[in-house]
Image (cartoon, rainbow, N blue to C red):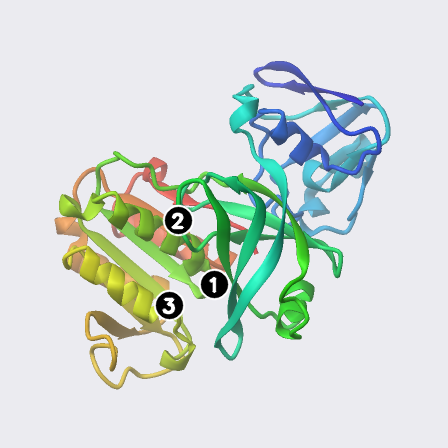
Amino acid sequence: MTITVQTKSGEFKFETDEEGTETLLFAGLGAGLTLPYECATGTCGTCRARVMSGDVEMAWPEAPGASRLSRGKGDVLLCQSHAKGDCLLRVPAEVIAGDAAAAPRRLSGRIEGMRKLTADVVDFEIALDSAMDFAAGQFMVVTSSAVTGGRSYSMVNYTPETDRIRFVVKRKPDGGFSNWLFEGAADGSEVSLFGPLGKATFRPGEDGDLVCITGGSGIAGIMSILDHATQDGHFKSNSGWLYFGVRTLADAFYVEELAELVEKSGGALQVILALSDEVASAPTHPEHPSIRLEEGFVHEVAARAMGEISGQLNDRTIGFVAGPPPMVDGAIRVLLSEAKLPPGRIRYDKFS
């Protein structure tokens, strides 16, 4: 089937499978088009398009991101839509045709090595059927036949051209995928993945201090960024600050890995754990004294610290933010108002 897309930068065509099993977003991205998206799973509404002709069906009409669509005028979310034949779409964005060979693609893999990190956080690896390359900070959309719909998860690790990627997932009360993982039957299961996706990435050779603000499982992409930055020698000439929000000290995870990154950076990277629901019993972590403890929500802790470190930040400083949408909004305000970073130097992918 041929999909024609009218955009602010011209008209493009791409093909999708005759059965219409692939979403229009993934088919277009896979063809190398820079179609707009953020979460890629129906939450944000960024991938809005209007069907001008043809038959297009939305698999999840009640998706949160669909609440702002003009359904009577033919609006759909590309990440939830499947073509039933040739169609013409209008996308209100600048789109370019990139290198299809470097575009995101569909992969399959198997869940392995499930580990329970805290009472409501697990991590696991996925052994891929073929190697992939990705930028630190990117994510994949993961689907399983056991659960309806896809979920976006950032890679925790960073290794060029790898066939193993690692994810961390926090259990949510009504989270179908996270509940499936916690029920214990997921280890060894086959999954389908699409990616890599996301633009909130570390770019090797880009000079500048790093200020990272994150909470809960949002630490995943930040871990990948700090891992790559450390491997790349970024902290030999730049500083870094990570503000990581958790409820209590018992809810903190990846602490040992973070302490190792501090050591590898020669102390140029500082890690601050923000405890929102507990008074810190000491100024530093009891087992890893290189990690500081502060009290309060992570964006509040970061805001207080900006007065202390803003004078130390170089004019090439990059801010990275990851976590639940309300936390992301608060952290962005801190980086804009307190750290005085221009919007173009703040990177985030907002999805929940």
Return the x and y of residue 252 as percentages of the image width and height: 39, 74
- The residue type indicated by label 1 comes to Ser
Q: CA distance from mark 2 to mark 1?
A: 16 Å
Residue 217's disc is 1
Q: Residue 240: in sight, yes or no?
A: yes
How far across and down, in percent of the image, does residue 219 sit?
41, 60
Q: How many numbered circles are shown?
A: 3
Circle 2 or circle 1, nearest the eye: 2
Q: Secondary structure at mark 1?
A: helix
Give neighbour class at mark 3: few <14, some 14-19, many 20+ (Cα, 10 Å): few
Mark 2 lies on a secondary structure that is loop
**Disc number placed over residue 254 in the picture, else none:** 3
User: As displayed, is residue 173 above or below residue 141?
Assistant: below
Q: Residue furthest bottom?
A: 281
Would you say 303 lies left or right of 119 here? left
Quadrant for the N terminus in the image: top right
Residue 14, relative to residue 17: is it above or below?
above
Mark 3 against mark 1, which lies toward the viewer? 3
**Which residue matches tag 2?**
158
Please identify the quarter of the rendering in which residue 86 is found. top right
